[in-house]
Image (spheres, grey):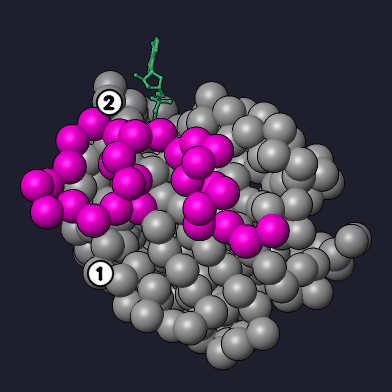
Amino acid sequence: MELEKKPIKEFTAKVIKVITETPTTKTLVFDISHVDFDFYPGQYVMLNVPYEGEVLKRAYSIANPPTRKGLLELTIKRTPNGRASVVLTERVKEGDEFLIKGPYGKFVWIPQMGTNLVLIGAGSGIVPLMCMLRYISDSKLEHVRATLLYSNTHYEEIIYRQELEELDRLSNIKVVHTLTRSAPEDWKGYRGRINADMLLKEVDNIPANLYYLCGPPAFVDDMASLLVELGVDKESIKKEKYD
Ligand SMILES: Cc1cc2nc3c(=O)[nH]c(=O)nc-3n(C[C@H](O)[C@H](O)[C@H](O)COP(=O)(O)OP(=O)(O)OC[C@H]3O[C@@H](n4cnc5c(N)ncnc54)[C@H](O)[C@@H]3O)c2cc1C
């Protein structure tokens, strides 16, 4: 399906709120009420990040749905030894300004593309998937069914944990967690990497869904191979690799 491109805008925007999501992850909320900015759920922007006299350009998925106007939310996880992500998660404060350009990307979903969705993410790969879930919830798209499979190393690292619990209470959204390294004693989710057993248990009629995979390149490639083995057509698998 060929979508009409949203116009690319370049603008400066001020951080109006910094939200701590996990010990390594922050959400920066920008005021963009001065810009006529529109995008599809799943798209990203390029952010210019000043770093030791240089300017680093980095891609960040848009976390808020297009239904919430005037604001732009980016959720950034600190990459060990990373540069931009360390500035963004440790040094940025309210009032700081950044140059932003976008939207970009073909990892998008709108209801006309399919109404049975399976979203599979690891770590910060949740961000564009959360945008899609927030869009489904905000727009009351009750005919859309979405299952999120979300993999993290530790419980404390689950981004948007409370909001995901709330979304899971909606009749058309199901949230499934797995933890790969450690889990609390009373943990009710899965342990270990997302595998065929998990998919067969949690997803009805596997080949009949539209899949969105997001996270580190190796995770996305592994998930895509697994889905193809389970009979999913390549055309039904959309991928966004955070490299
Ligand atoms: C489309 C897209 C959307 C994205 N959306 C998000 C998002 O929503 N949230 C998010 O958190 N991230 C997102 N990312 C990832 C993000 O763009 C950055 O790649 C990430 O924040 C790391 O940037 P950095 O400058 O901190 O790391 P860099 O400094 O670029 O380092 C990256 C890695 O390289 C290693 N490294 C650094 N310097 C060296 C060196 N000299 N030699 C060897 N290794 C080195 C680091 O240890 C680190 O592991 C997205 C990426 C893409 C492509």
Assess whether residue 120 is covered by the magenta stretch.
no
| Image quadrant in which the N terminus is located | bottom right
- How many numbered callouts? 2
Image check: 219 left or right of 163? right
Q: Nearer the viewer, residue 75 or 48?
A: 75
Q: Circle 2 — which element? A: loop
**Residue 24, label in figure:** none
Q: Residue at x 68, y 53 (%)?
A: 206
Let me know if residue 47 appears in the view. Answer: no
Residue 27 vs residue 88, the one in the foreground: 27
Q: Nearer the viewer, residue 125 or 145?
A: 145
Horizontal side of 90 relative to 70 (left or right) equals: left
Up/down of 155 relative to 57, above or below: below
Quarter of the render that holds ligand 1: top left
In the rendered image, is residue 81 in sight?
Answer: yes
Left or right for 39, reference 174:
right
Q: Residue furthest left?
A: 185
Q: Amino acid at mark 2?
A: Pro
| Above-or-below relation of 16 to 84 | below
What span is in magenta?
177-205
Q: Position of residue 90 (x, y in %)?
A: 19, 43
Q: Is mark 2 within 8 Å of ligand 1?
A: yes
Query: According to the image, label 2 marks what residue?
Result: 80
For label 1, the residue is 162
Q: Position of residue 79 (x, y in %)?
A: 32, 31
| Magenta stretch: includes residue 203 | yes
Among the two numbered marks 1 and 2 on one chain, the one whose residue lies closer to the N terminus:
2
Q: Residue at x 54, y 47 (%)?
A: 199
Please, what is the three-letter code of the amino acid marked with disc 1? Answer: Gln
Q: Identify the image quadrant of residue 117.
A: bottom right
Pointer 1 with pointer 2, Cβ within 8 A: no
